Amino acid sequence: MLCWFCAKAARGSCKFCGRGVCEDHARFGPFLLEVHRSESRRRAEGLVVEDAIQCGACHPRPQPIPMPELD
Amino acid sequence: MSIVESHLSVWEALAGRAPGQPIGPSDTDVWSAVVDRINPARAKPEIRAGIEVAELTSVRGVPYLMLRSPDDGVSVRYLRLSPEEWQLAQLMDGSRTVARLVAEFAHISGRLAPDQVRRIVADLAANHMLGELPVDAFGPLEKVRRRPFPLRLGAGLLAAARGRRMVVANVDPLIDTLYRFGGRLFFTPVAAVLFGIVALAGFGLFAWTWWRGDQSVFISNGSFLVGAIVLLALNFTALAAHELGHALAAKHVGRRVPAAGFLVYFGIPSVFVDTSDVWMAGRRARLRTTLAGPAAGLVLAGSAQIVGLIFPAVAPLAFKLAFAWYLNALFNMNPLLALDGYYLLMDWLEIPNLRARGLAFVGGRLRRRPPRWAELDREGRLVALYGTLAVLWMVVAANIFYRVWSDRVQGLVSALWHGGFGPRLLLLLVVGGLGAPLAYLLMGWISRRLRRFRTARQEAKRAEDAPRRLHALNRSMLGRLPAEVLARLAERARWDRPGDGRQLLFASGAQSKVYVVVEGALVGRRPGDPGGILRQQAGPGDTVGLDAALAGAPSALDWYVAGDAVLLSVPSTLVADVVGPLPGPPPADRRYAEALFDDTPALTGLSPEGRMGMLAAARSSSINPGEPIRLDGPTDAVIVESGAIVLPDGGELRRGTMIGPVGEGFPGAVAVARTPVRLWTIPAMAGASATFAGSASFDGTDRPPLRPAVGVHSGGDYPPLAAPPGMPPGGVDYGLDGRFERRLWWLVLLLLLLALALTAGQLRPGPAWAEMPSDRVLLTAETGAVDVTVPGRRITLDEGGRYQLPIGAEITVGGSSRASLTFRGGAISVLCAGSSAAIRDLHSDGDRVRTPSGTLDLSNGRILSDTASTTGAFAPLSLEISSARVSITSTEAAWYAVASGQAVVSRGEVRADRITQPQTGGELDCGDGLPDPLPTPSSTPSVSPTPAVSESPSESPSPTPSASDSSSPTPSTPADDEDDDGGVVPPPVTRSPTPSRTTTSPTPPVRTTNPPSPTPSASPPPPTEGPSSSPSGPVISSGTITPSAPVDQSPTISSVPPSTIIF
């Protein structure tokens, strides 16, 4: 796989969209690995990877979108 | 490679929004919330309710607080904080961010210390004292994928062998009851005096009993197997009593004993009690609790010995129990191991990591590595003296173990080694049990060396290892450097695994490397500081020596390794070369800033790296009179370099004063310039990690790897001595270390004298019969090989070999050999060359004084017997020798020879078929021409010449003139051998007129003074040394022994060697 930006050999892929990124174009940020509800602490909480690879080109939407078709 | 600045929302970053652009309401999404949650600077720690706090003072007068986490079912944690730090911790109510806490701490302490605040938060979190308890979210995944049962069982057994605690139970109520109903009396002054007397008297009794040899360690009811089982059980009892001592002492100082259970302790099944709670009670309590274990052992051992003296029936058990207690105390007081002895000294001196540093010093000096003694400061000398103590203790322990080996275990070996498979297996188990701690330590050492060797081999493959080095650099504070710079550093970097306690860098010394801490920690202290004071601590991700490398200055501190550290070392010159000029303001401005930092009291507590980070992020500005002075962010602070500013309340500030940080919100204008003012704005949260971050956008947010994960003090540390690093607090006692040093010198001297005394004591052999059942006799092949036939087997003992013979054994001594039989109590019979004998009966009677008795059948050759016991614990041997159908008996101390049914008696009452034999007072020997007719003292320590020897007509140059007379062989001819009683050849056996033996005489004087004599034929006696020269009369006894030995061994007078030995 090649880097999406410079076509050099990719070192990883974006956690959100899968684009390949080389060492120079890799960016890092948090990624929610799992969200669950803790019964003992009575709250929703998430497991986070703090430095997951992000390409910076994709646009994961921050807000959920309704999916009534699945209801 | 670029980093998404985590002070922005992820979405913002992903959308390519410029940093600092306001975020719209619609952007308050899950991703920005995630970013906010994981930003340590924005975390709002909340301290838990129920934390117990004890206000204590160190031995050097430094006040501190010991915190105990709430007891909520998980393991209790302890943490030491300074009063200022505890004041800050109390502000952690969940409403203040860490950034705000940095500001609060600046107000409390007058110092800007972002790294210290981060460390406090991390320490509190790691020790379960913050509301958000650490949870291992991925741990349950391991349980999902369960390994096969054999693997789990093997892992469990391995963990148990390595000391994992098992069967833990809450024993606090039980200990509390024991303490209230009697245990508290043990801690009264009267009890202390009484216990001291009992311990001393009991130890004296034990030593006395040991030397007398009337009690065995490894035998119970005549069985070695039962003895081993009993000893194991008693050892367990001894360990339990030791731990009970600790537990009661912890109760005495008012603390809890939450847990107890079993564990494998240096390879020995043992018990434990958890007395960690005594950390809340201070130094004296710690010392008392630690001391209580060995003291309990010593007192109980002494009591057991006294009970054994009063009631002889229980004396064997009491002796074994005392042995187990003394062994346990010796083991526990060893400063080489992290046991009671080490903790006592460490708590007494209050210097952490004393053992590792002390041993590292000794090891370093053996390798001629610095520092030398003359280069040490006061604390360094204390550490070095500890290392010396440990070495001396090793000498003492080696002496004691050799004594146990030579006095006891050798007897065990001689009893079991020739006994077939079962006894040999038992022997291996017993010796393995005794040597388990050593084997445990040895295996641990080998395992570590193998692991290190494998790691070194992998790391030697430089190309394959490069990603690991790069990764380690990336996770350090150097990780903010450009990728190509990191690659160059990684190319030259080397892994370094210095031993725990080793001094790595020297203050004011040349520094050739920059160290990146990958695992473990380095601690820095300034020479001359009081003991136990650390200036800095560098944990994973930190660097040591970076400031010195970049500034070209020597290190300001001595740096030591703390724990099993893994470091990555990079040449300082390379770091200076590739990193280039220091980040931050241009050189001219930088000099002003550095001078200003020196003049600012609030910045004096910064570490060199922290200061460098602060400088890198600092920026200057000039303000005209009347203009406001603003703080752009909650973590910003300004320092006045020149001019004067006025606060809203009218107060005027000048050079070296700092305003901010406020911690939260945007404070805006905080003062007004009264004159032209030059200011420096610094991000107060910067700390060391900001060094390479640049100053433009840094707001205190760290990259994840730089956030301390477990704090400075992990749970494995010794919290009472884990003093927070920093400047020596005011009021610290600088003179105490001098007093400690003087006392340590005395301790070294005492231990040295003890070591010398014990080493000298090795010259006195102990009782060879101590570990011999009453139905055994110890056979020693003194010269040549000896054949033994025990029921069912035939064994050949080589020269020097020993074997505890059972009843029924038959002995055949070769023509050029000689053997000895040592009976319980030290009586000895020498089987001359060509003799054959059988053991018919052996037993002992009596409690306080044992009477050993034995029956031998002499079918051929000659026996010399000395039936006197060498210890008061045994009466003289009652010996019956059947020879040529004649029963020759002795019931009291006697010295006589038997051959062919006839006895030649030198001394004592001996009967032949109930007819008392005349005493000649003459000398006896085998007359077999062998160079040394006496058993060597080492092989039969029970036989030894006494001072009486000097009075005997021996050939040794003793002070008495007569001694030289007998040194000449009797110039008799074979014709002279026949005496008037019918051609009987007097046995060429010499014997001192007053034979007496002790177990303590190391070397017969005759042996030390007589070189090995030639055979009789080779050295005919000089005519000048004829019998007439002997003032004590002829050495030929008037006995009536008919020689029955082979011709070449016939006890003719002419065959008496010149070196005839005198008993």
Image (spheres, rainbow, N blue to C red):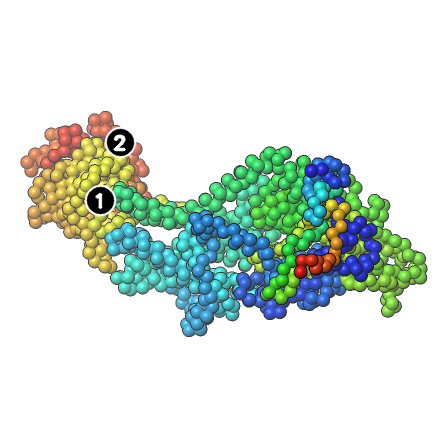
User: Residue B805, labelled with which disc?
Assistant: 1
Q: How many marks?
A: 2
Above or below for B362 versus B307: above
Q: Find the residue positioned furthest to the top.
A: B1018
- Residue drawn at the location 34% of the way across and 62% of the way down: B304
Q: Position of residue B544 (x, y in %)?
A: 68, 46
- Residue drawn at the location 16% of the way across and 40% of the way down: B837
Say which element carries label 1. strand
- Residue drawn at the location 8% of the way across and 44% of the way down: B886
Q: Find the residue positioned furthest to the front.
A: A69
Q: Which residue is mark 2?
A: B1013
Q: Residues within 10 Å of mark 1 (few under 14, many from 20)?
A: many
- Residue drawn at the location 55% of the way across and 49% of the way down: B356
Q: CA distance from mark 1 to mark 2?
A: 31 Å
Q: Disc 1: which chain?
A: B
* 1 or 2: tag closer to the N-terminus: 1
Q: Amino acid at mark 1?
A: Leu
Q: Position of residue B70 (x, y in %)?
A: 58, 67
